[in-house]
Amino acid sequence: MTARRLSNSTRQALPASVAVPGYDRNRVVPGIIHLGVGAFHRAHQAAYVDDCLAAGDTDWGIVGVSLRSADTRDALAPQDGLYTLAVRSSDSESLRVVGSILSMLVAPEDPGAVLAALTDPRTAIVTLTITEKAYLRAAGGGLDTAHPDIVHDLANPQMPRTAHGFLAEALARRRVAGIQPFTVLCCDNLPANGATLHRLLVEFAALRGTDLARHIADQVAFPSSMVDRIVPATTDADRARISGQLGVEDAWPVMTEPFCQWVVEDDFPAGRPDWERFGVTMVGDVGPFEDMKLRLLNGSHSAIAYLGLLSGYETVDRAFANPAIRQFVDGLWAEAITTLPKDVGLDTADYTDQLAKRYSNTALAHRTAQIANDGSQKLPQRIIASAMERMSGGAPPAYLMLVVAAWIAACEARGKSLPENHFTDPLDLALAALDTRHLSAGEAVAAVFDLAGFAKDGAERLTLIDLAAAHLERLRQGGVAAAFAALGIASE
């Protein structure tokens, strides 16, 4: 690997095949703060913003904030925030250098600097991709007020640790200074993500005082959005390959697929970029699009991950190439489609056709273990919600509940047929204490439902447990092939 780094000074010397920012980055104004600068943000929102900057809309540069680790800042700071976006299909790859991230802050190092950026009058939008677990919801869906970081932020509002603490304190300071509130745009896979974050932040603010809670409830916009792009983890081999093509070192390029989708509720009182010029769908109601994505893409992704792990497949494309897993995914989609809203313009046939092509992309090498992380946080909206709605319509969710059983079986397989820490979950300590491998399938599933809060208070809960338990017993006794056979799917 070469010693020179990708940067403002080296970008003009890159090969002609590599797209580079054609705008003067020194003229870009920071109008967006992004909390959670991971690979997904850099492959998705930051790329859309980069398009806007290139078109001359220079008021929307991004200040990135890492709420935990300094890794992204340490990789991008020597590169002036530049990084390579590698768009890969099975037979081609295109490289693009993205310049929309102007600077990076690491919250634990200097929370005051983050609050100053959030309070800056130029900041009109705050976007978030902090993953589901960082919203710190209790089992019932409300704010986990007992979480140590929430307790800390309430006691130390000037030194917050959580997104809740930073947003509430910044909005309080802006209010005192007479600065218009920024718009808060959640880009995580939460149901009704804008309304969900709004509710959680109002709950948090109410613990600080009713005036702040009322201000956030009445004066701050929280549009919902639906995001979709597959972004596998970057490997050392990716870094070496990309740096070799650039002729300079890129410490943290991002791999992604050609497909990219963003559906956004159009509610931005403080203004926004002209995103629709570059393919963003601005709508009045994101809900139907969000449901389709959560239940068809995210739900099948989880299914492929857990069934793939149990079948010995390391990547999505290899698992999806298995005819039995592919047939199962088709059946899963058929069940989930019946729960989606009708007459709102959703083209589920085209959407699932696109998903099949995306899952077959051999270049991405999207690891099943990566997707398997945080199942207890992801399955409620991806699988459980669909299963409950399907049952309320009088139809059994047989395929859907196999996904839940496969998650439990994959958790049980860690330390046996799978490596001990092959994937992780926020409930790992509690799951280990349960030691479900020594319980009957029915006892294990009921205990996990209680622990994770699945279908809590739902009339369908006992039936869902019975269905998942039957699947888990088959997985334990005969593996994935036995579970598939019960659904009429023949394995190779």
Image: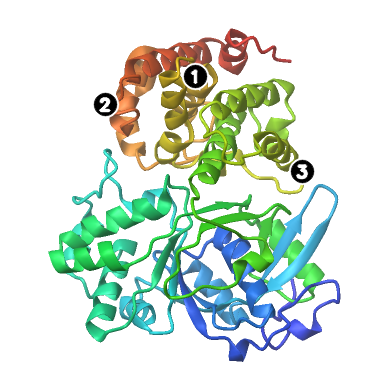
Quarter placement of the N terminus: bottom right
Looking at the picture, which amino acid does disc 2 mark? Asp
Which residue is found at the position 64% from the left and 28% from the top? Answer: 312
Residue 62 in the image: x percent, y percent? 52, 76
Can residue 440 be seen by looking at this rendering? no
Q: Which disc number belongs to residue 463?
A: none
Alpha-carbon neighbours of circle 1 within 10 Å: few (<14), some, or many (≥20)? many
Image side of residue 492 versus residue 150, left or right: right
Quadrant hosting residue 317: top right
Looking at the picture, which amino acid does disc 3 mark? Thr
Q: Nearer the viewer, mark 2 or mark 3?
A: 2
Q: Nearer the viewer, mark 3 or mark 1?
A: 1
Q: Secondary structure at mark 2?
A: loop
Going from N to C along the chain, the mark reached first, 2 or 3, is 3
- Front one among 461 and 273: 273
Relative vertical location of residue 267 with respect to residue 473 in this rendering, above or below = below
CA distance for labels 2 and 3? 42 Å
Relative vertical location of residue 227 with respect to residue 438 in this rendering, above or below = below
Looking at the picture, which amino acid does disc 1 mark? Pro
Quadrant hosting residue 485: top right
Q: Where does label 1 land, which residue?
A: 397
Q: Pointer 3 and pointer 1: residues touching (CB < 8 Å)?
A: no
Residue 320 in the image: x percent, y percent? 70, 31
- Front one among 391 and 402: 391
Q: Where does label 3 land, which residue?
A: 362
Q: Secondary structure at mark 1?
A: loop
Which residue is found at the position 34% from the left and 71% from the top? Answer: 108
Residue 453 in the image: x percent, y percent? 30, 32
Q: Where does label 2 land, which residue?
A: 457
